Image: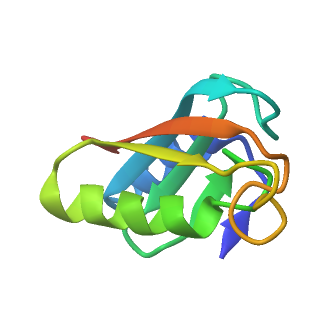
Amino acid sequence: MTTASDPLIQLDRWQAEGRKTALATVVSTWGSSPRPVGSHLAVSDTGDFAGSVSGGCIEGAVVAAAQEAIASGQAKLLEFGVTNEMAWEVGLACGGRIQVLVEPVAA
């Protein structure tokens, strides 16, 4: 389930409810990318999420990595990108590259 509210506000709400959370942040981009550096995706331990790091094309993989970060307590740096020739087949349809830092967030 996704929520439409600000990801940082939603993360605070989930923590107030006693849920474990993680935050994914776009830390760098190269070429064309759907979301700018600083974009956030908040994820709860139940798989709910708010915000966006890619406009949808990598959110599933980032949510899965966030679930792993919540379980392990370890941050992870993810990188996604494809060549322009492969852009429409997999990953980023924009043809760019993006790095996303996924961190568990302690209450």
Task: Give me the residue at 35% from left, 66% from top.
Answer: 67
Residue closer to the observer: 58 or 44: 58
Q: Is residue 73 above or below residue 35?
A: below
Q: Residue at x 79, y 46 (%)?
A: 95
Q: Where is residue 59? Give x, y as percent.
A: 63, 61
Name above or below for residue 14 compared with residue 105. Answer: below
Taking the image as shown, residue 82 lies to the left or right of residue 16, namely: right
Closest to the observer: 102 or 57?
57
Residue 106's image quarter?
A: top left
Residue at point 82% right, 41% down? 34
Classify residue 18 by image quadrant.
Answer: bottom left
Q: Is residue 61 visible?
A: yes
The residue that appears at 73% across and 62% down in the rendered structure is 57
Count of numbered circles on the image: 0
Return the x and y of residue 107 as percentages of the image width and height: 27, 41
One can see residue 9 in this view: no
x, y percent for residue 89: 77, 72
In the picture provided, is 21 more to the left or to the right than 41? Answer: left
Image quarter where the N terminus lies is bottom right
95 vs 58, nearest the viewer:
95
Which residue is at the far front?
85
Residue 53 location, x and y as percent? Answer: 66, 44
Report whether 6 appears left or right of 74: right
Looking at the image, residue 37 sits to the left or right of residue 86; the answer is left
